[in-house]
Each structure stands twice: as C-alpha cells, then as structure tokens.
Image: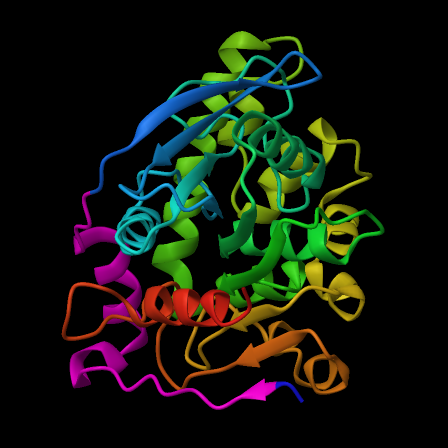
C-alpha cells in the first residue's frame, strides 16, 4: 500500500500508445483564460506564471509545471487549469526558465531537478495571495521536479495539502535509454531539434559559453545534456545530472499525500519509473498504473482527460 487500482478505460483508438501521446500533445484543444505575471527570482533571472482564476474566492490554488520543452500553453496544462477553475480553484501554471516564449537572462535555464525555483514560486504565491490551500500537479519533467521537491529535506508549507504527478520519468537515465529505442525515434528527434533550436537562441546571448558548431554536433539528448544541461547547472556530466536529479531517489521521503499516475504503455518510461516497492512501503505515495494512457495522454469520450478528473478527486478528498 498504497498501490491504486486504476479505473481508466479509454476508447479503443486511445489504447494505442502513439495515438494517445500524439493526440494529447498535437491535436487536443483546451482553451482557458490566462493572465501572465513576471516573477523576479533572487538570482536576477525571471519566471513567467500564467494564471487562470476561478469566479469563486475559495482561497485555493493549484501550481502546475509542464514537461520538457513545454510551457503553460500546452493543452495538458490549459485543460487542467480549465477543469480546476470551473471547480473553485485558481491555477498558477509555471513556465520554467526560458520556456515562456522569451529567453531568460542567465546562461542557466531549467532542468528536471531545479527545486530552488519551485521553492521561490511557492513562497511568492503564498506571500502575495495568502492562499489557505495549495496543491501541486506536475507533468513529465515537471512532475519529476515536484516529486524531488517533496522528497528533499525541506519544510513543506502547511498550506500544501496534496500533489498529483502524471507520466513522470522518475529515473532520468532509464527514460533516456527508453527514448533511444527505435519505436521512439520520432519523439527523440523532435526533442533533440527543439532543444537544439533553444540552445541556438541561447548561444546568441552567450557566445563565449556556447557555440553553434557545438550545438549542431549534438546527435542525441545525451549529447545535449553533456554539452549544456550538466555544464550550465554545475553537474559533472549528463550521467551525474541524471543521477542527482532522478526523483526516484527521493520518493521514500515524501510525507505529503501524493498520487503518481504512470501508464504501463508509456513508451517514454523505463521499468525503474514504476516504483511499486517504494509505494507499497509508503504511507504517502500512491501509485496508479493504468494499462493505457501513453505519455500525458489519458483521453476520454468527453472534454476532460482522466488525469484531470483524477487529480481533482485525489486532491479534493485530502482537504
């Protein structure tokens, strides 16, 4: 315990891993009103928060973080924001450094374990708005970041009541090796190209630290993490970065009710990303592994996704 039996039963077409993954990322539309707030960070950089507000003044806020090379505009974020605002929650969707459409000021950007930035977001929101109730919802890389935050040695604010994480690569190196498999070639190439384009923009601002030639020479995500992610964020190399920031290392220390939803047919996740033994021994980490869902998929025959409904249900039951 707590291993959770899933009730997700998708339409037949969405039992296919690729269809579920691609549809939710590329085709689904889930518009919601958002207001942008620029948040200044202690080190002189900035984050952009995209707020969606409920018509109620319930004193509840959900903090959401997107996945690798995503943003607060992605449909899995806006769909979640729409679902929660309709039920009385304000939603603060975080754009990690450099992900809001504007390059950030520093050479460093974001990574899967940048929990100091999340700590600043939490403190900023509680200080400015004085919410009585807070919850987390993270997707993929953002979920790994939030799980690491919850499992680190830190004081969790009393307002933070529960958390839900979706499609999380709890073991970063294992997920990298999974993405390198033939069936994931298109996804790996798409991530690589997006990251290279991001770095080419960054190289214009920091030509002494990053060159166009180095970036174009990268053939894989591992190369990019060796060239930039590890070096910009003070890790020895990509493997050191993966080891130190994989949330699996922190799961046993989580003391907040936390639901992890990782579909069994998620082609981005390695076996190590399904922490059954840790969940069985934990009083706080709930693990749900539906047969289907792909990577951040979970589509249904209705506007909201299964994970949106499930997140609201799990969090609401713990208030």
Give the residue at x 55% y 55%: 143
User: Is 234 rendered above or below residue 83?
Assistant: above
Q: Give the residue furthest to the front.
A: 57
**Is residue 163 visible to us here?**
yes
Give the residue at x 40% y 49%: 189
Query: What percent of the width, then of the height, locates residue 97?
Result: 54, 28
Residue 225 position by quadrant: top right
Give the residue at x 58% y 61%: 162
- Check if residue 8 falls in the magenta segment: yes
Query: What percent of the width, then of the height, locates residue 167?
Result: 48, 65
On the rendered structure, is 231 left or right of 109? right
On the rendered structure, is 157 left or right of 62? right
Residue 188 position by quadrant: bottom left
Q: Quadrant of the N terminus?
A: bottom right
In this rendered view, identify the residue nearer to me: 278 or 312. 312
Magenta stretch: give its range.
Answer: 3-31
- Check if residue 311 falls in the magenta segment: no
């Amino acid at each position: 315990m707590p291993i959770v039996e899933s009730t997700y039963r998708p339409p037949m077409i969405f039992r296919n891993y690729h269809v579920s993954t691609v549809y939710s990322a590329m085709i689904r539309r889930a518009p919601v009103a958002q207001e942008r707030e620029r948040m200044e960070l202690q080190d002189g950089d900035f984050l952009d928060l995209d707020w969606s507000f409920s018509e109620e003044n319930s004193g509840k806020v959900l903090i959401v973080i997107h996945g690798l090379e995503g943003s607060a505009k992605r449909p899995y974020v806006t769909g979640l924001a729409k679902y929660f605002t309709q039920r009385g929650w304000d939603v603060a969707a975080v754009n990690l450094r450099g992900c809001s459409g504007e390059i950030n000021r520093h050479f460093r950007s974001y990574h899967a374990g940048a929990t100091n930035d999340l700590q600043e977001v939490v403190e900023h929101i509680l200080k400015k708005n004085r919410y009585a109730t807070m919850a987390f919802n993270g997707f993929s890389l953002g979920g790994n970041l939030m799980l690491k935050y919850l499992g680190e040695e830190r004081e969790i604010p009393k307002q933070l009541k529960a958390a839900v994480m979706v499609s999380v690569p709890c073991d970063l190196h294992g997920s990298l090796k999974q993405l390198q498999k033939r069936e994931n070639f298109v996804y790996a190439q798409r991530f690589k190209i997006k990251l290279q384009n991001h770095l080419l923009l960054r190289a214009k601002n920091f030509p002494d630290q990053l060159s166009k030639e180095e970036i174009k020479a990268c053939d894989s995500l591992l190369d990019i993490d060796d060239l930039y992610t590890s070096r910009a964020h003070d890790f020895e190399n990509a493997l050191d970065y993966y080891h130190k920031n994989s949330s699996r290392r922190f799961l046993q220390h989580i003391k907040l009710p936390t639901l992890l939803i990782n579909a069994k047919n998620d082609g981005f996740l390695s076996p190590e990303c399904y922490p059954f033994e840790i969940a069985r021994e934990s009083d706080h980490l709930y693990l749900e592994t539906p047969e289907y869902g792909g990577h951040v998929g979970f589509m249904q025959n209705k506007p909201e996704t299964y994970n949106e409904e499930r997140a609201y249900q799990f969090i609401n039951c713990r208030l």
